[in-house]
Image: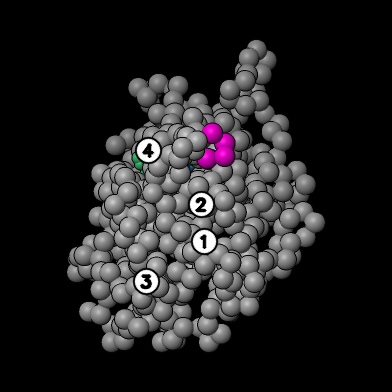
Amino acid sequence: MSIRKHPPRPWPLLVLALTLGSGVAVGCGSSEPYFRANLTEMRLRESRDEPISPELQSEISNVLLSLFGDPDAPDIFAGQGVAAEAKAPLEAFGFDLAKLQLAAGPAFSDQTGKQHGLYRLHCAHCHGVSGDGNGPTAPFLNPYPRDYRQGKYKFKSTFGDAKPTDDDLKRILKDGIPGTAMPSFVLLPDNEIDALVEYVKYLSVRGETEIRLIEYVADEGEMPEGGIAEIAGGVPLQLDDDGLPEAEPEYENVVASILYKWAAAPTRIVQPVVPTVPLNSQSSGKDAEALAASIERGRKLFFSAETKCASCHGDAALGDGETTNFDDWTKAVFQPDANMQIEAAHAAEMLALGALPVRNIRPRNLRQGIYRGGRRPIDIYRRIFSGINGSPMPAQGSEAGIAGDNVSDDEAGGSVRRQKIWDLVNYVLSLPYEPLSQPPRPVEGYDITLR
Ligand code: HEC
Ligand code: HEC
């Protein structure tokens, strides 16, 4: 096999010296201050008889280096310009260099007490220096830390596969992800949170660019014709008065077409319809009756063929309905068949290339009252409306329905009328308080057989 664990890095000597030099000074979780190549992606994309050559591999890492720098110096080519762009590439891409510099590099505090190297200090031991979700702590965790390189995020306000907004990422950092190892960083000052959010986006755009380049060379046997000018072309994005991108860039402009999706995230926020029912956290007296009726409607929907919630979450909502599925990250690497079986030889090869061992994804146990994406009714509405990106949990809403009361239900489509999503929200939020010993009441058309 032609892929080496550490592809050659024909970097300028200065860069090499910098990297090695800093290796001594860095702390926990940063014994590898270089971006690991995405070896599993290469193996998955290349054909057996025509592996991606070492020359092409190093071309990819060279392009990535000149566009994104290295873990110690994201702005390595600042001032030198790239291709047709006069600005340092990351600035042209719209990144805030000062924020990236604060988050990148080895962790230390300077004489003024200012903390540097925030990402390696707080995140890398789980998410890895490269943002591949494979830091030294990762193998011990379930779920695994996010691999940012797929550009996929789960707990966000936007619909479907849209990127999270900056506010979504900030909220994740402040709240953490309850029920998982992802901690809260609420005690960090806002400027540090901002720097970390910028750095997550940077790793994500870099990782997606790498995947797109691997895809390209695997298909074409060469780098894109226009070279780095084309790959980095189309930036800065043309923005309208609201700061949103005017038009989608050419697919060949790899970085621009990835940045476009990030910039467009705010246009895809799910606005819920204004609830006509009282919500489960705030009802008393007369409201209580309306709430009880809403919960009962939600219960029926939960067990209906329309939503199939119970088929995954289980007849008692303990999360034990469908337990053999995988998340998209695992599926992408291990490629299970329709019966969720993974070929042993393929699995062994992926593990040898550094993939984390396979883990099933389980639907949430809704009796526990622990919600990874937040416990406010609007959070649960968005989870049900959009599904959970990267997981088997399906969307009940549709793209058109994100505009809340600005579109009618007929225009909105989707599998469930949006007011009914509030009934489901009320039911979900009632589950932790419903005695489990109480046998589930029958729902017409649904056969409840307790396991
Ligand atoms: C102790 C391990 C750990 C540390 C430290 C950690 N994370 Fe995480 N992080 C996780 C896990 C586990 C998940 C995945 C949770 C899931 O999929 O439900 C995650 C998920 C995420 C996500 C994805 C959220 C989404 O909606 O998909 C982001 C973004 C993130 N972490 C950023 C960070 C940043 C930035 C830091 C450092 C400031 C950090 N994490 C530190 C374990 C960690
Ligand atoms: C195909 C299987 C499947 C179906 C159908 C399904 N879910 Fe899920 N659900 C999941 C999985 C898997 C998760 C965990 C996803 C994760 O954390 O990555 C989940 C998570 C959740 C969560 C937790 C959200 C959070 O923030 O932690 C809620 C609430 C939920 N589902 C409600 C529902 C409701 C209501 C329905 C029906 C409208 C439904 N689910 C249908 C698989 C499913």
**Residue 230 image offset from top left, x and y in percent:** 58, 79
- Stretch of the chain drawn in magenta: 189-193
4 vs 1, front mark: 1
Which numbered disc flags the more N-terminal residue, 4 or 2?
2
Instruction: Kindly report the distance in space between the C-alpha atoms of the residues bearing marks 1 and 3.
Output: 16 Å
Q: Can residue 50 be seen in this view?
A: yes
Instruction: Kindly report the distance in space between the C-alpha atoms of the residues bearing marks 4 and 2.
Output: 29 Å
**Residue 337 image offset from top left, x and y in percent:** 32, 66
Q: Does the residue labelled 2 lie within 8 Å of ligand 1?
A: no
Q: What residue type is labelled 3?
A: Leu
Q: Is residue 324 visible?
A: no
- Hey, which quadrant is residue 232 in on the image? bottom right
Residue identifier under label 2 = 101
Disc 1 residue crowd, few under 14, some 14–19, many 20+, Cα 10 Å: many
Q: In this view, does 84 lie above or below 407?
A: below
Which numbered disc flags the more N-terminal residue, 1 or 2?
1
Query: Which residue sits at x=54%, y=57%?
Result: 161
Q: In this view, does 432 lie to the left or right of 49?
A: right
Instruction: Kindly report the distance in space between the C-alpha atoms of the residues bearing marks 4 and 1.
Output: 33 Å
Q: Residue placed farthest to the top in the image?
A: 285
Element type where label 4 sits in the image: loop
Q: What residue type is labelled 4?
A: Thr
